[in-house]
Image (spheres, rainbow, N blue to C red):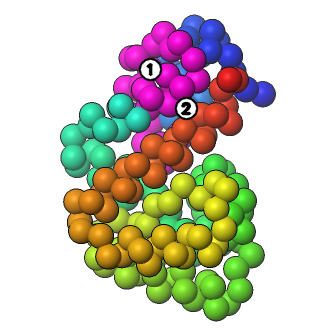
Amino acid sequence: MRLSIGDLNRMAVADFIAGFGDVAEHSPWVAERAAGARPFADRDAVADAFAAALRGAAPDERLAVLRAHPDLAGRAALAGEVSDDSRREQAGAGLDKLTSEQFGRFTALNAAYRERFGIPFIFAVKGASAAMILAAFEERLGNGHEAELETATDNVCRIMRFRIEDRVAG
């Protein structure tokens, strides 16, 4: 059941955090800061408030949000040790049904990416295929460090928007 904007605007801050604290992976402080932007005019304003909270955070806070994301098709995902949102999103992209060759490729790229950038590869997988994600992996490995941190942040903002769209009526 999706909430209306009116319901969202009337929620106590603690209830808002309880309902939206996982929109930014393991980072309820993003929801707490986004709550301060209420009242929201519409669902886009909710997503914008979450993005502004993340982008306005101190660099170490932003980096912690990036590091909180699981590897795509990683061991935690396969073991079911990721958030329900992450599990659904990865399954929607077919990452729970990879061939052993594809899984090996994801494992190698996850390791190379973490080694290069110090964060997991973050890609808003909704609507993407495993092949699209692998191509983005390879392309982004060539990015500079600051450009890639910005690209990862952009993807977190897309992920948060998708999660908000799932929870808030348009």
Task: Please state, as top left, top right, bottom left or bottom right, where the C terminus lies in the image.
Answer: top right
Q: What mark, if any, has residue 35 been given in the picture?
A: 1
Residue drawn at x 45%, y 52% is 155
Taking the image as shown, residue 155 lies to the left or right of residue 15, namely left
Q: Nearer the viewer, residue 42 or 20?
A: 42
Outermost residue toward the right? Answer: 1
* Secondary structure under the numbered disc 1 in the rendered image: helix
Residue drawn at x 32%, y 76% is 142
Q: Which residue is mark 2?
A: 20
Residue drawn at x 54%, y 38% is 161
Taking the image as shown, residue 67 lies to the left or right of residue 31, namely left
Position of residue 6 measured from the top left corner of the image (x, y, whole percent): 63, 9
Position of residue 107 measured from the top left corner of the image (x, y, whole percent): 51, 83
Q: Nearer the viewer, residue 114 or 17?
A: 114
Outermost residue toward the bottom? Answer: 101
* Secondary structure under the numbered disc 2 in the rendered image: helix
Establish if 96 lies above or below 55.
below
Under mark 2, the amino acid is Phe
Q: What mark, if any, has residue 5 been given in the picture?
A: none
Specify start and end residues of the magenta stretch as a single range.
22-50
